[in-house]
Amino acid sequence: MRATVSFGRICGIRVGAHWSALVGVMVLGDLLAVTVLPVLVPGRVPAVYVLAGAVAALVLVLSLLAHELAHALVARRAGLAVRQITLWLLGGVSELEQQPARAAAEIRIALVGPLTSLALAGLFAGVAWATTWLGAPALIGAVLSWLATVNVMLGVFNMLPGSPLDGGRVLHGVIWWATGDRERATRAAAGAGQILGGLLAALGIFLVLRGRSDGLWLLLVGGFLGFAAGAERVHGVLAERLQGLTAADVMSREPAVAEGWWTVQALIDRMLAPDSPRHRVFPVMDFSGRPVGVLRLTDLAAVDPASRFTTTVQAVARPLPPEHRLDAETPLERALERPIAPGRDVLVVEQGGRVAGVITSSDLQRIVELQALRRGSGPTASRDGAA
């Protein structure tokens, strides 16, 4: 998930927020100002409720950030690189460069998030009690009590045993440790997540049919969990099968490339020749052999015929996204994090700053199928992941 707004770095880790998180803060602040706080502490002017609601919503976002930062710091202590933290509507995501190599590390990383939320809940509850005892305005105590309650709910909810929740990570780690089979653990934790998502969605529908608007939220959360668990199951199994391979192991070597200094007409003539490359998308190179863009046949067709003799290939090439450039030694499972559409995109593999090969969606599909054949009809157990 890409961040819409960047907040810089905390402890060296990039932090940002998806647009849905920004919408969530506004909706939550409005809900508190209009519905929750006037009931808990009646008799205040609307502006006070709006201010208190906005502050409470922002502090809750900081609580979510603390939850994710705890995951990231423990992961980094375990030797894992953390790419970034992205907050969004239903919480946050800590993106790791690689998965834990041992089950014990995965369990520790998963547990620290909910424990952080519960610790924050205790902190807010304690401060709420102290402000009440000191005679502070009741609205302050109400906001702090609400924050304590929400953080308890956040900690407990995240410990439900199903991916992609933290409880699902713990379940995955326990099954991995007990069986030594990481792929089996992935299937079990993802399956539990799909069941959990289905139950929450069903409960949401039941509440909606009974006239409860809060059922819509459960329906949304349940649908997200079910979808995310299914996607994680596919991704996890594929990543397990590709473990140990690098981009160089699967790339097409000496790929057909488009020279950026050629004219569009010259490249079209090459494409129409009998011995032309049988591809629809090509990396574009400069004089030094460095990739500077990517070109599709449809990009050539879109150029006005009258301009094809004077327009260079590089001028019509599309920028090559940084995430679509891989080093030859990059673990192949990292390629799964870079979606490539058939006939539209390629991953460019570089070695020494030059194009060494390309990876297409067909290349990835083929290697996955070959790895499945190598594994036989069932996964091979290994105790490498034992705690």
Image: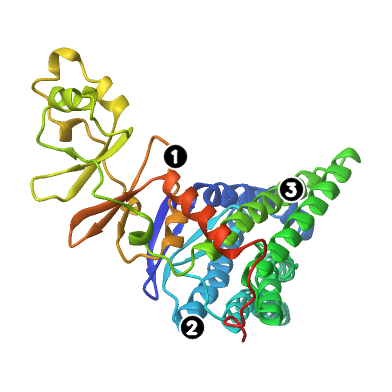
The image position of residue 287, as x and y in percent, is 8, 46
From the viewer's perspective, is 222 left or right of 5? Answer: right
Q: Considering the numbered disc 3 on the image, is that residue within a helix, a strand or a loop?
A: helix
Q: CA distance from mark 2 to mark 3?
A: 36 Å
Q: CA distance from mark 1 to mark 3?
A: 33 Å
**Residue 137 coordinates in the image, percent (x, y):** 68, 69
What label does residue 341 carry, if any?
1
First of labels 2, 3 by sequence position: 2
Residue tagged by mark 2? 78
Q: Is residue 326 found left or right of 194 in the rendered image?
A: left
Q: Identify the amino acid type marked 2.
A: Ala
Q: What amino acid is labelled 3 in the image?
A: Trp
Viewer-nearest residue: 228 or 152? 228
Q: Position of residue 329 (x, y in %)?
A: 32, 66
- Would you identify the image quadrant in which residue 9 lies? bottom left
Q: In front: mark 2 or mark 3?
A: 2
Q: Name the residue type under label 1.
A: Ala
Whether residue 29 sits left or right of residue 98 in the image: it is: right
Which numbered dot is residue 217? 3
Q: Earlier in the sequence, mark 1 or mark 3?
A: 3
Hey, which quadrant is residue 133 in on the image? bottom right
Residue 258 higher or lower than 43, as above or below? above
Nearer mark to the viewer, of 1 and 3: 1
Q: Position of residue 60 (x, y in %)?
A: 60, 64
User: What residue is rendered at 63% in x and 67% in y?
Assistant: 183
The mark tally for this picture is 3
Please, what secondary structure does the residue beneath circle 2 have? Answer: loop
* Neighbourhood count class around disc 3 (C-alpha, 10 Å): few under 14, some 14–19, many 20 upward: some
Q: Is the residue 305 above or below the residue 36 in the image?
A: above
